[in-house]
Image (cartoon, helix red, strand yellow):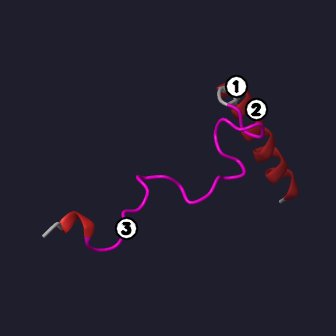
Amino acid sequence: MDYGKSGAPKKGKNTPRHQEHNAKGTDKNPFGDGQTKAELLARMKAAATAKKNTQ
């Protein structure tokens, strides 16, 4: 008996079911387009001061 031919068909090998709209490497989210640490710190400081001013 050939057991390889029985049962349910095999699924795809670790492939996503759909494409994400903001996946890495697309036009909306290209590779290497991240923030620098200085930009991140400036944004965090601005958010902290804005939060402090509202209280």
36 in relation to 22, above or below: above
Q: Mark 2 points at which residue?
A: 42
Q: Quadrant of residue 38?
A: top right
Identify which residue, 44 or 13, lies in the foreground: 13
User: Tag count in the figure?
Assistant: 3
SS at badge 3: loop
Q: What residue type is labelled 2?
A: Ala
Q: Where in the figure is residue 44, as x and y percent of width and height?
A: 72, 40
Q: Tell me whether circle 2 and circle 1 mark residues in contact (CB < 8 Å).
A: yes
Residue furthest out toward the right: 54
SS at badge 2: helix
- Queried whether the magenta region covers residue 48, the answer comes back as no
Give left or right: position of 19 versus 47.
left
Q: Which amino acid does label 3 sit on?
A: Pro
What residue appears at the point 49 percent right and 52 percent down from the top-left corner?
A: 15
Q: Where in the figure is residue 53, as x and y percent of width and height?
A: 86, 51
Q: Mark 1 points at which residue?
A: 38
Give left or right: position of 25 versus 42.
left
Report crowding for label 3: few under 14, some 14 to 19, many 20 or more residues within 10 A (C-alpha): few
